[in-house]
Amino acid sequence: MNKFLPFVLIASCAFVFAGNAGAQTRKTGSPRPAEVREEVAPTSNATAAPAEAVQRAREIITYLFHEKPDIASDANAQTRWLSEPMRKALANRQKVYANYAKENPDSPEGPPSNSDFIGSWNYPTSFRFVGSRLSGQRAVVDVLFRWGKNTEYPGDTRLTYYVLVRENGSWKLEDIYTFEGKFVAAESLLETFRQSSYP
């Protein structure tokens, strides 16, 4: 028998084993990312939101700029303007706050209110629409809030997206997304209301 044969066999087995281990690693590891293909967009890749959706956002904001009535306790306003997911999220937020208030009776934190939908306890001086888009059953209305003199945030501006969804033949508020700003963190109101902790 060739004296080198055992070494050749051992080396061959080691090579096969290593190859199989490598194959198993590739199978069980993360798949190799496929090449992403960019689709050619239509000539007009952005459709403005319907005037009805923009008007609905205007009505909601005008309502919210008053302390009373408060959408958190105004059932008619909730039915008229809030989508089902937002109504459920608001109910959850109220429940979470009630539990929090019991355990923290001296806390300055208050219950959900109109100010949550504006994104600030200190109301802005003005607002204007700066854009809108339609995507299927959703409309996104871009709103720029501005704080003037004699406010807590003079000169500040905040870009906010009001997301409306077509529900039962009407445009309803599904979410409000506020972008990161000097005095505010980026936030989805729907996700905030869904949280199980307060504030």
Image (tube, grey):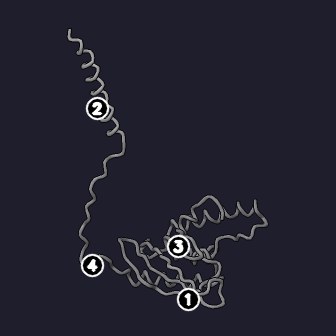
Mark 3 or mark 2, which has the lower sequence index? 2
Mark 4 or mark 1, which has the lower sequence index? 4
Front of the two marks 2 and 1 = 2
- The three-letter code of the residue at mark 4 reads Ser
Most extreme residue toward the front is 3
Q: Can you identify the residue that label 1 sits on?
A: 126
x then y, percent, for residue 23? 30, 35
Measure how far apart labels 2 and 1 are at the Cα level.
Answer: 68 Å
Mark 3 burial class by Cα count in 10 Å: few <14, some 14-19, many 20+: few
Q: Residue 3: tell me if it is visible.
A: yes
- The three-letter code of the residue at mark 1 reads Ser
Q: Say whether residue 72 is left or right of residue 54.
A: right
Measure how far apart labels 3 and 4 are at the Cα level.
Answer: 29 Å
Q: Can you identify the residue that label 2 sits on?
A: 19
Q: What element does badge 3 sit on?
A: loop
Residue, x 35% and y 37% (percent of image)? Answer: 25
Quarter of the picture holding the C terminus? bottom right
Q: What element does badge 1 sit on?
A: strand
Mark 3 or mark 4, which has the lower sequence index? 4
Residue, x 56% and y 70% (percent of image)? Answer: 185
Say which mark, if any, is on residue 180: 3
